[in-house]
Image (spheres, rainbow, N blue to C red):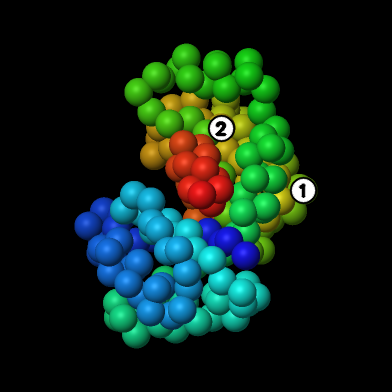
Amino acid sequence: MTYAALFRGINVGGKNIVKMVELRQLLSGLGFRNVKTYIQSGNAIFDSDDEAPKIKETIQVAFQSAFQFECAVILRTKEEIEAVIKSLPFSKTEMAEAAAANSEVEHLYYYFSDNPPGRSMIRTIGAEYGGPDKLAVGAGGMYLLCHESIRDSKLAAALVKQNFSMTARNWKTLTKLSAMMET
């Protein structure tokens, strides 16, 4: 089976530095096949016959040993990544409005989580926010559509304050990972 391993918080702000060549070597050394990485933010694709819980535990233990810090990792299969892309809840009009607000930044993100908040929590967070950004529940995570940079999004900040274990990827990265999983 083909998996995407999404590492949380590496190579962000000059902290928790991990070279992708070293990450590929670690994963290959664990017996995973066809290991590839994409950009420096901790995205890896590989094949394995093992089940996700075993893979996740193996990666986290080996990662901490190799790099000397803990790093949460979220695994998704090729089918799960494709389902996220196919289930995009925002209309073309909504996405165009966000893009028109600031053409210099990414606007669409997906927050992956092994324990995402439910619809009622998402509605509560969105209602308290009250701005133009939008949040929607997905399978195993949440979609975020920002009108400005994610760094300036009060909705993104409100979501992070909830202390869910999650890692975000912009839409460009997500679609690239999906394409990499096809080859």
Q: Quadrant of residue 91?
A: top right
Name the kind of residue labelled 1 in the image.
Ser
Can residue 157 be seen here? Answer: no
- Amino acid under disc 2: Leu
Residue 17: horizontal and vertical position, in percent? 25, 64
Q: Residue at the far right: name it.
A: 120
Q: Position of residue 179 (x, y in %)?
A: 52, 43
Q: Earlier in the sequence, mark 2 or mark 1?
A: 1
Q: Identify the residue position indicated by label 1 in the image.
A: 120
Q: Nearer the viewer, residue 150 or 179?
A: 179
What residue is drawn where x is 55% and y is 16%? 97
- Judged left or right of residue 135, residue 37 is left
Q: Residue at x 45, y 63 (%)?
A: 34
Q: Which residue is found at the position 74% from the left and 53% from the top?
A: 118
Q: Is residue 34 above or below residue 105?
A: below
**In the rendered view, would you say 23 is above or below 54?**
above
**Quick one: SS at disc 2?**
strand
What x and y, as percent, mark residue 139? Answer: 71, 51
Disc 1 secondary structure class: helix
The percent coordinates of residue 169 (x first, y second) are: 48, 46
Q: Residue at x 27, y 64 (%)?
A: 21
* Figure quadrant of the N terminus: bottom right
Which residue is denoted by mark 2 in the rendering?
Answer: 145
- Please say whether residue 57 is visible from this viewpoint: yes
